[in-house]
Image: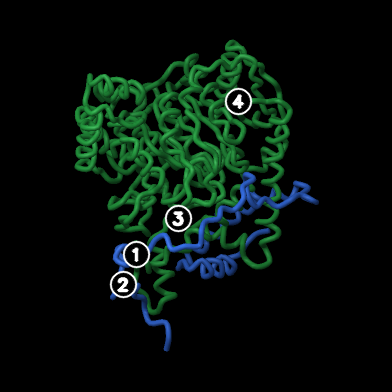
Chain colours: A green, B blue
Amino acid sequence: MTELTKLTISEAREKLTQKDISSAELTESYIGAIEAANDSLNAYVALTFDQARSMAKASDERLAAGAGGALEGIPLGIKDLFCTKGVHSQACSHILNGFKPRYESTITANLWADGAVMLGKLNMDEFAMGSSNETSYYGSVTNPWRANGSDRSLVPGGSSGGSASAVAAQMCAGATATDTGGSIRQPAAFTGTVGIKPTYGRCSRWGVVAFASSLDQAGPITRSVRDSAIMLKSMASVDEKDTTSANIPVPDYEAAIGKSVKGMRIGIPAEYVVDDMPEEISALWEQGKAWLKDAGAEIVPISLPHTKYALPAYYIVAPAEASSNLARYDGVRYGLRVEGEDITDMYEKTRAAGFGDEVKRRVLIGTYVLSAGYYDAYYLRAQKVRTLIKRDFETVFADGVDAILTPATPSAAFSIGDETMTADPVKMYLNDIFTVTVNMAGLPGISVPAGINKDGLPLGLQVIGKAFDEETLFSVGEVLEQAAGRFSPKPWW
Amino acid sequence: MSVDTDTVKRVAQLARIAVSEEQVETMTGELNTILGFVEQLNEVNVDGVETMTSVLPMAAKQRKDVINDGGIPEDIVANAPLSEDHFFAVPKVVE
């Protein structure tokens, strides 16, 4: 961590444009920070420093010529789920052993076209399946935050745990991430960073390794709300290569920062008051309401009656889609191959050796719920429940609610190897209880750090918006950030 | 609904994942925990509710039916564990 790595994207952008600093200097500072921290935090699984240096050099030339792009010279980390040409892209799975794509994902191509610099590939839960970054083939990521007076290692959340940890520990200025059930917002909340999952269809999924295609959506993790607005503007695009990419122009999200929320109606869903909600989470939520009220918003009670069914429906829909998407890993076209007696034996051995336990669990659940005789009872019913979940949101928005405020997670970051979570997969799944409804309904949601608990760990609030109304989330998010302040961990690594 | 070890073995076979007897035991327990959790969906009245097919209203995109890519066999097989003459090589499948 240096003076340079402390800069937010917007601050660095200004200094780069003013030529107070060069991208080469900024990039070297981040390289130094990664070298100092990665052994402790395990946030990066592949480093691309040579590429970073040459990209920085090219950025400095463009900046000198006054031809810099929106992210010119800004060093970023890329989640391992994104395909980057000629560079490690394995979704942190052993089954993609050695895979180096011959193409670039649309999102990363957009970032490079805007001048960003790639530092390396970030750790994540295998195939984005997890809420603690403990399912990665490359080992757990450690949260740069620790409880007061404790040296116990905490999880950074997941699946974008490497992204969140790297951003919080200043090992990159911002990072790409993806969110299928909460994988951007939960790690952001656990690390005191900002994360937005945009509307389904806003960012192209082309070149992003698929987990559950109807739920997957990419977004940024950054150190400020403004930085998220800047990064999302570059990541989002209308893409012919993704049939689910929305044909709607990308607005200037940064223009929404600082816009007043006066007169906005902010919904507070009764169903998000869950049993055993820790006092610190209720208090944080109350504080969030008070801040928005002070800023002139109107706080209105709302009801989203099918909320409790979102997580069970998700655990049918997501594994079903995953079992189908992951059928492609068979040891033939890329990645790991374990030889067998015949081709079926080869498939079975390859997949047994290549997938970790959580991935196997979900592929098996998915295969079961889609199998003959069970399809109607499970998958079809879950997709009907999903319609009801979406209808709940449509109803409150039609009644004049502009955005919804909820906690981002039911707790602060927990320990690596937490026994109750390891013993019961459902306990781990409950981490996504406040975030998963948003994916089920295809809506945008932002997680903003809102406070520190009694143990000294960050907590986040979530703002949910209407489809393609990310701008309101940035306006509301900025109000929360202005009130709460920004948070960074004390370096111990 | 719950699954027994035979069902888990059959599902693992459908999913083409080799599993040991010991793994089947563990997985059966875990799968039943998850299936027990999703059971609560049966409380929901879904009569007359449409099945979700697209989370946002969007028409399927169409493009001109023209060749817009190709001629890159080296790229296609570049990551294959085993290939010959631009073909993916697999164990013999025809007797």
Work out whether disc 1 and disc 3 sit on a shared chain.
no
Q: Which residue corresponds to the image point at 22% horizontal and 42% vertical from the top-left?
A: A51
Instruction: Measure how far apart labels 4 and 1 are at the Cα level.
Output: 47 Å
Quarter of the image where one finds residue A441: top right
Q: Residues within 10 Å of mark 4 (few under 14, many from 20)?
A: many
Label 2 sits on what residue type? His
Residue on which the image places disc 1: B76
Query: Which of marks 1 and 2 precedes in the sequence?
Result: 1
Q: Amino acid at mark 3?
A: Asp
Dot 4 amino acid type: Leu
- At mark 4, the secondary structure is strand
Q: Position of residue A240 (x, y in %)?
A: 48, 50
Give the labeled residue for mark 3.
A357
C-alpha gap between disc 2 and disc 1: 8 Å
Q: Quadrant of the N terminus of chain A?
A: top left
Q: Tell me the crowding category of disc 1: few under 14, some 14 to 19, or many 20 or more residues within 10 angstroms, Cα based.
A: some
Chain bearing tag 3 is A
Mark 2 chain: B
| Res A377 visible | yes
Disc 2 on helix, strand or loop?
Answer: loop
The answer to which of A8 and A202 lies nearer the viewer is: A202
| Quadrant for the C terminus of chain A in the image | top left
**Are discs 3 and 4 less than 8 Å apart at CB?**
no
Does label 1 lie on the same chain as label 4? no
| Left or right: A128, with A442 as reference point | left
Residue A405 badge: 4
The disc placed on residue B86 is: 2
